[in-house]
Image (spheres, rainbow, N blue to C red):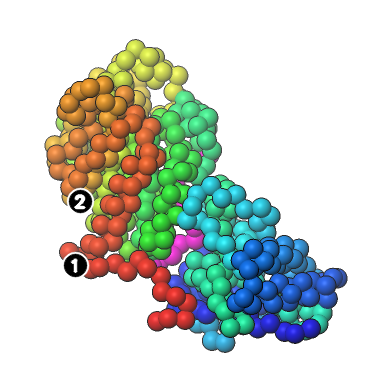
Amino acid sequence: MTRRIVSIRTRPAKTAIIGGVLAVAAAVSGCQSLAPPDAGTSAKRIDDALGVIADPTAPSRKVKAAETAYRRTLARMLPAALDGRARPDFEAAAADPPARPDPDTFTELTPVDSPRIRTPGLHRAGLGAPVVGRIYPGGPNAPRAGYHTAVTAVALPAAKTRLRVGLADPELVETVGVGTRWVPLAMDLEAPLDATRALGPGIFGGLKYLLRADTFSGEARVGFLQPYDPAKRPLVLIHGLMTTPRMWDRLVRELLADPCIRAEYQIWFFYYPTAQPVPLSALQLRNALDDAVAWHNVQQPMVLVGYSMGGVLARAQVSSLTLDQAEGILPGVSALPEDHLARQALVFEPRPDVSRVVFMFTPHRGSRLATLNLAVWGTRLIRLPDWVRNEMSDVVNSVRGLPRGRLPTSIHGLSPRSPFLAELDRRPPVAPAHTILGNRGRRRPLSQSSDGVVPYSSAHLRAAVSEVAVPTGHGGFDHPQSIAELKRILRLDLATQSRGQRVAPSCARPSLGEG
């Protein structure tokens, strides 16, 4: 059997640290030499497929069939490759990789049987078998079920009855050498998104945690979609009322389908029960970001994107309230201890590590829907956590506009009469801000328009660097025009470094072997 030489061109890769352990530091993993029961047959199939792929005169349909045969054969080999009873030592796949990831980092490697292509840009046809690698637990900001990452398995015959199998990062390795040809490495970035639980439960979970915030599991937290990468900027997505991070699913896929944004940003989610008083949720976001920054020693500036009420939480991160101003919101707050929950939620400084903030369909000056009878009736169904009720019991009667003895909820906090919103609105954000808002039309001037929930008069921010009105209702955060504007803003942020230095970001990935 003629041996086909498969080589992999690499370039310097970004180091990724997961829970303090070097996990994916090079483009290619170690290769494992294995001899499964049908190794002879499988090795021949692999070799035959490589022969077709290496032939520059082979018709494209024949090459495609060979790639499919290669992928299916390799996928059948993986269970044997992962069998702990037959694990030989690993050896380097490339001649001089800067480092190689430890295959033991992955607790599971699941081949992608039939790729579901729903988002262009997340897939690449080519050589190899796309695999979903699971990393568990992965650190304090990992999804509860661990990270799900995209890897691609590659193989070549090592002997007549043996194969060398290795893993490659398809975002760092774009092409592989087969004979004298360089062919694309297969990539599937959508399968890990289908498998991940980083986005949390769906709409019913959002409704549950609105009405019964006391059933919310654990504390409000910042979760990462992928293992932390110190070279990428955090992009923090903050959901709105009665939702969970699941609402961002389509938008996230569209962002990751953009090679520039995928290469330069890492996506973080703030997940919280939306019934709580707005200042309390803003405090929890501030603390959760502080914890993530400290744990991972984050040096890159972050971009905040807040939808609806999430935009109010984002604005609190780039604003300040003094003790005197807090006194106007909650009389008597200045007499509380400094560590009291109410005082911490109402007295704060802007974050210095936010380079830009994007407000999507945000009610800066509240929404009249929060004052309608149905909304007021709904607040009576909301049950806040015991710890919130205990902490706030001594100040609840000082909150203006509430029936005596009743705790404020997020719906109260979104009223146009909210003193917290009024105080925030008196001072512009300290970071560059952008507005994306909805306009359902109705043959009215923009100044009199609405997205059906938030009127233009509330969504408009005079201090915003830019403002785009999208022809959609309040749920249009994933409208194509909304996504296009968000991408534009993210690219703009890449061009503006902290400390005011202007640079031209290089989003293009060089060919492997170049630079």
Mark 2 closeness class: few <14, some 14–19, many ≥20 residues within 10 Å:
some
Q: Which residue occupies the foreground of this view, 467 or 21?
A: 467
| Amino acid type, residue under disc 1 in the picture | Gln
In which quadrant of the rendered view does residue 359 lie?
Answer: top left
The one nearer the camera, 228 or 387, is 228
Tell me where residue 444 appears, x and y as whole percent. 20, 23
Q: Is residue 369 visible?
A: yes
Which quarter of the picture shows residue 68?
bottom right
Residue at the image position 64 percent from the left and 72 percent from the top: 58
- Please indicate whether residue 454 sits to the left or right of residue 110 in the image: left
Question: Dividing the image into 4 quarters, which one contains the N terminus?
Answer: bottom right
Left or right: where 385 falls relative to 102:
left
Question: Which residue reaches farthest right?
Answer: 37
Label 2: element kind: loop
Q: Is residue 354 left or right of residue 298?
A: left
Q: Which residue is mark 1?
A: 501
Q: Which mark is residue 333?
A: none
Q: Quadrant of residue 296?
A: bottom left
